Image: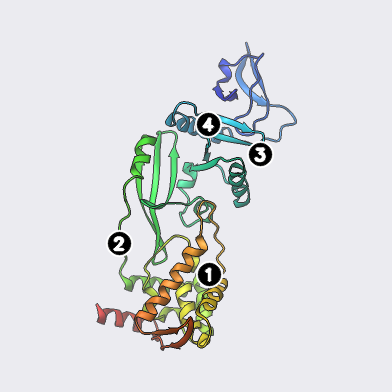
Amino acid sequence: MAYENGRLVKASDALKTHHYRCCECGELLVLRKGINKIPHFAHQSNSKCNSNEGESYVHNLGKFRILHSLPNGTRVEVYLPMIKQRADVLYHHLAVEYQCSPITLKRLTERVSGYLSIGITSFWILGMKYYRKRLASPNVLKFLRYHKNTGFYLIYLDPLTSRYLLRYCICQSDGKYQYQDRTFTKWATMIAFFKSNRQKEQLHPNLIKVCQRIEYQVRHLDPNMMKLQEYCYYHHSSITGCPLICHHYRDLPPVFGKQWLKWVVMIICELKKWVGKRIRQFVSEVYQKLDFTDHFVFLVNVKELRVSYINGFLNDLIDRKLLVIEHGIIKQVSDFTWYRDVYAKINVIRECS
């Protein structure tokens, strides 16, 4: 199949006097059909297109599913010469991209910025290959969006069943990603779903199991947990015996990634060194040391969101009289209870429950 003026054409219906373009790369195609030939389109000999025919079919089908979901006036495969980009689907000042194949963070950012430079908002719907990937993968999370009624979310499209798949209320609960799923057969129904508050309180695993999971990761040399263990060793402690207050925030927005536990551990370990210094400078220093590497193209103020949780945790320490701040200066830090090992910590949890 190929495109002619934004219309999808089968090779069997194509005419040799017309011009057709590749659905993936936009290059002019050669129509090959005859008495002894099965009709098909082919690239010219000097083509650099390496598109996969099966993927192209799914991609094209998805674009036309989206096309028929949107109002009249929507066009498909619209070339925008000002930015040298081709929109999968364009409706006035909204470009809808159906992303099936991998795309680098740099290229994604360039395409989004290109659309914005000419006053077009882009909305990205993911293919089923992304749906089957781990949610924790940076290749998936970079598409994350936020809505006040559904929280953090992603939208997928299965063009073979004409179903939109909404993954919403995405959060990190004790380091694991949790979410809710909803399926829609109509775009309008899905949009209506966003108009009422759908956020729900997450169910948490038993805190003892969380502590056991941390101990298991240390014992099996999980790379990220071992880095945190090394940091704790430097401060004469062990991550398996970290203070219970480290588990105060059991739900986090999905922008903390691998640092879901380190940020609170670091605050507790570093605070006493900062007595007599400004709390604002301390927060800035902690944030820099956390060295976040995840990037979110469609989220704004990610740093501010993370910092708000750091400040919230510090306020909790103040409320519990574990931290005293006067006029923006750290005056006093109480001792935090670290445990000998995970078993001592679990015993305390059981006694308190």
Residue under numbered circle 3: 83
Nearest to the eye among marks 1 and 3: give it.
Answer: 3
Q: Which residue is mark 4?
A: 60
Residue 200, numbered label: none
Q: Amino acid at mark 4?
A: Asn
Sequence-wise first label, 1 or 3: 3
Kindly indicate the quadrant of the structure image that contains residue 65. Answer: top left
Q: Mark 2 vs mark 1: which is more N-terminal? A: 2
Label 3 vs label 4: CA separation?
22 Å
Residue where numbered disc 1 is placed: 223
Q: Are marks 3 and 4 in contact (CB under 8 Å)?
A: no
Among the two numbered marks 1 and 4 on one chain, the one whose residue lies closer to the N terminus: 4
Local SS, label 4: helix
Say if residue 56 shows up in the picture.
Answer: yes
Across and down, in percent, residue 315 comes to: 40, 76
| Distance from the alpha carbon under mark 2 to that under mark 1 | 27 Å
Q: Are marks 2 and 1 in contact (CB under 8 Å)?
A: no
Whether the residues at callouts 2 and 4 have beta carbons within 8 Å, the answer is no
Q: Residues within 10 Å of mark 2 (few under 14, many from 20)?
A: few
Tell me where residue 79 sits by quadrant: top right
Q: Are marks 2 and 3 in contact (CB under 8 Å)?
A: no
Labels 1, 4: front one: 4
Closest to the camera, between mark 3 and mark 4, is 3
Give the answer, above or below, for where 2 lies relative to 269: above
Q: Amino acid at mark 1?
A: Pro
Q: Quadrant of residue 120?
A: top right
Residue in view at x 61 percent, y 40 percent: 118
Quick one: label 4, few (<14), some, or many (20+) residues within 10 Å? Answer: many
Is 319 on the left-hand or right-hand side of 160? Answer: left
